[in-house]
Image (tube, rainbow, N blue to C red):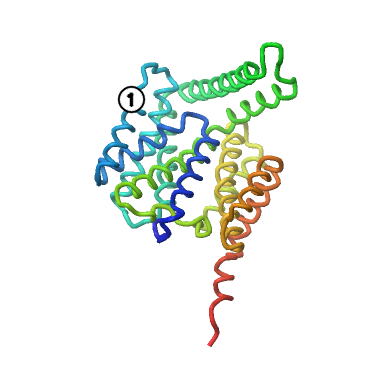
Amino acid sequence: MSEESPDRDRGWRRGGACLLVAMLLSVTSPTPLIAAPFLFLTFAVGVRGLPSLLLAGFAIVVLFGADIRGSLWYLERGWAVLVAGWFASLTLARPKSRFFTRALVSIAGAFLVTGVLFGTRTGAWSQVDWRMRQSLLEGAQNALAALQLFQGEGAGASTALVAAVMRTAEQQGELFPALLGLSSMAALAVAWWLYVRLGWRSGRGLAPLAEFRFNDHLVWLFVAGLGSLVLGMGDAWSRAGTNTVVFMGGLYALRGAAVVTFLTGGLSMVSAVFLGLGMLFLAPVVVGGALILGLGDTWLDVRAHVDRTREPRS
């Protein structure tokens, strides 16, 4: 995902796809994650046009307009402001750098600042961890209650469904740092796409999926995460390793999807339907296959090899 794409007609699909990812992976409300970066970009980098100004006003309402402000409200917005501040600063400092580079550094910087703050306050991480897990469990319980209401008073969710939903919530609680990082990355993509589209009337905010790649040396983060799991250095290191593997695994799965998209020439409506069905019924297989392909591309560089074979020979 970079800014070099001249394709304006399909830009909205990329923005919409990133919005869907942000909503599906978010362990908090995704709207502050989009609103804060857009607001920072609009006023720090520059306001261009009435649509940008109006959306910035709406972003202010989203960020600060809620009447009920609990601890989770402040946590969501604190994280969103951290990420937005990093991203806007990097955009000002290096406006020609690739979107993904700025986004990844912004997420890493936000985690670094958060880690320092938690490290200087005894018990801060435990409180945040507990609050996030409680929020996810409450969300799962509310979803089951809504399902029961939809089905009628006499009906109830099956024991297997209840167990699956609650188990998913527990897993999300364990993996919320990685999910927060991935959803923040997707939200940054939406904010950047909106800023470029509205402010500059351009579809060059996000490049096609087929062009998505990143520095090959990042594979060592994935390896380090696996190493901490294999060596069994304690619960804290194991959890950090698990979250690192999930975060980098998500990026490598996306890279694998980019390779497939490049080789097939794009994602048609029919293939999108089949992909949706695959994710619905065979998600572990689809994601696992994309992950392996993405990791393999680190060494094989399939797209570069195909480009070389397509070059005309003299």
Q: Residue 25: horizontal and vertical position, in percent?
A: 54, 36
Q: Which amino acid does label 1 sit on?
A: Phe
For the view shown, which residue lies furthest in the top direction?
Answer: 153
Q: Where is residue 105 in the image (x, y as percent from the top left)?
A: 42, 47
Residue 304 found in image quarter: bottom right
In the image, residue 172 lies at what x, y percent? Answer: 59, 30
Residue at 52% over, 24% down: 132
Residue 122's quadrant in the figure? top left
Relative to 179, say whether 146 is above or below. Answer: above
> 2 above or below 21?
below
Direction from residue 248 to residue 10 in the image, left or right: left
**Horizontally, is 8 left or right of 136 in the view?**
left
Identify residue for label 1.
64
Q: Residue at point 33% right, 57% down?
A: 96
Residue under the point 58% across and 48% down: 222
- Could you tell me which residue is drawn at 71 percent across and 15 percent down? 155
Q: How crowded is mark 1: few (under 14 residues within 10 Å), some or many (20 or more)?
A: few
Question: Quick one: SS at disc 1?
Answer: helix
Return the x and y of residue 210 as percentages of the image width and height.
Answer: 53, 59
6 horizontally vs 308: left or right: left
| Farthest residue, direction bottom | 314
